[in-house]
Image (cartoon, rainbow, N blue to C red):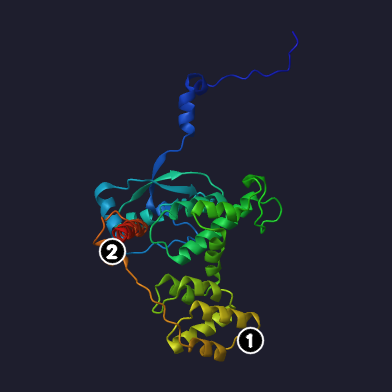
């Protein structure tokens, strides 16, 4: 009897007695309790984990109730542990609370997928510093470009993945900003750290966002020189002063004397009213965010204005 040459494929015992639902369940992501020693923070994480009362409150909650929402992590290439993509503050709070493990969803992700997921998760936080937002936008935009581009990885025009739209336009829609504002935030990443600290408000001197964007066009050596000039004058540039500093820089004429002359000019006083969150918080429920407070105040002012108009028309 001639052999057909075909090999018979026998169904394994497991396949024979395993249902399709069970097989799908095996492939489904699960929450795993991972030892803290096996978890490490995301590399180049742009969002600071501040050891403040908020982190302490989180640690106290974890002590009492455990981690209510699992983090997201991916395996390290060498198999030694896991990199936390979402949940870096939870990881730090678990360490502070003396926990041994943390619940985590483990998912295989590329570098760009991990960056995008990390940024998206952290942009939902309140009280994000300008520097955090700046580096987050930059990291996500670069990842989106790499994901969508065909040949030129530095080009902002992506391929079929975004149906002909620029990745910067997609990002702007996702974060609720204009495309120009996204790029203005990214410009902050060109500032030297001491000036960026001024923008964040964590330095002794404070600097407004718009002047900082203009100063980002100065060279690194010019920015360092400007630090000394600001310290000498005990002042930071206004928007118009920053624009002139930028112009002198582009013309190759920016010197320390020019900086001191510009900074020594008297700034025009602008009438403004500043209401801090601390001042307003006693009038609102604790659950209200600064954005919610602002929206409520605007609505109340609109009602008050309409009432005044009605009274004047009587």
Q: Nearer the viewer, residue 207 or 109?
A: 207
* Residue 298 image position (x, y, % from top left): 35, 59
Residue under pointer 1: 253
Q: Nearer the viewer, mark 1 or mark 2?
A: 2
The answer to whether residue 55 is seen in the rendering is no
Residue at the image position 53 percent from the left and 68 percent from the top: 189
The answer to whether residue 28 is seen in the rendering is yes
Q: Quadrant of residue 199?
A: bottom left
Q: Residues within 10 Å of mark 1 (few under 14, many from 20)?
A: few
Relative height, residue 218 to residue 304 (above, below): below
Q: Residues within 10 Å of mark 2 (few under 14, many from 20)?
A: few
Q: Where is the N terminus found, in terms of image quarters?
A: top right
> Closer to the N terminus: mark 1 or mark 2?
1
Residue 88: mark in rendering: none
Element marked by disc 2: helix
* Residue 241 image position (x, y, % from top left): 52, 81
Residue 280: mark in rendering: 2
Relative height, residue 229 to residue 130 (above, below): below
Name the residue at the top extreme: 1
Element marked by disc 1: loop
* Residue 173 image position (x, y, % from top left): 53, 52
Mark 1 to mark 2 CA distance (whole Å):
46 Å
């Amino acid at each position: 009897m001639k052999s057909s040459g075909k090999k018979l494929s026998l169904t394994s015992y497991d396949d024979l007695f395993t249902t399709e639902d069970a097989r799908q369940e095996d492939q489904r992501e699960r929450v795993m309790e991972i030892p803290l020693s096996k978890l490490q923070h995301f590399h180049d994480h742009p969002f600071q984990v501040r050891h403040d009362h908020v982190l302490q409150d989180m640690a106290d909650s974890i002590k009492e109730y455990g981690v209510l929402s699992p983090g997201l992590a991916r395996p390290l290439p060498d198999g030694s542990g896991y990199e936390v993509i979402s949940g870096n503050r939870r990881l730090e709070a678990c360490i502070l609370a003396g926990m041994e493990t943390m619940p985590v969803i483990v998912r295989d992700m590329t570098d760009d997928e991990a960056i995008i997921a990390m940024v998206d998760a952290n942009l939902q936080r309140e009280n994000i510093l300008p520097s955090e937002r700046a580096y987050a936008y930059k990291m996500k935009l670069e990842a989106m470009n790499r994901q969508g581009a065909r040949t030129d990885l530095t080009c902002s025009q992506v391929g079929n993945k975004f149906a002909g739209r620029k990745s910067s336009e997609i990002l702007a829609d996702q974060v609720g900003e204009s495309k120009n504002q996204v790029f203005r935030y990214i410009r902050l990443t060109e500032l030297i750290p001491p000036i960026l600290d001024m923008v964040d408000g964590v330095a002794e001197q404070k600097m407004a966002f718009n002047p900082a964007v203009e100063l980002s066009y100065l060279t690194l050596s010019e920015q360092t020189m400007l630090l000394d000039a600001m310290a000498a004058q005990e002042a930071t540039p206004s928007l118009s002063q920053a624009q002139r500093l930028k112009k002198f820089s582009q013309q190759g004429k920016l010197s320390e004397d020019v900086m001191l002359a510009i900074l020594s000019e008297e700034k025009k006083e602008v009438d403004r009213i500043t209401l801090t969150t601390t001042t307003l918080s006693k009038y609102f429920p604790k659950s209200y965010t600064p954005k919610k407070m602002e929206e409520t105040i605007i609505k109340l002012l609109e009602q008050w204005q309409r009432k005044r108009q009605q009274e004047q028309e009587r």
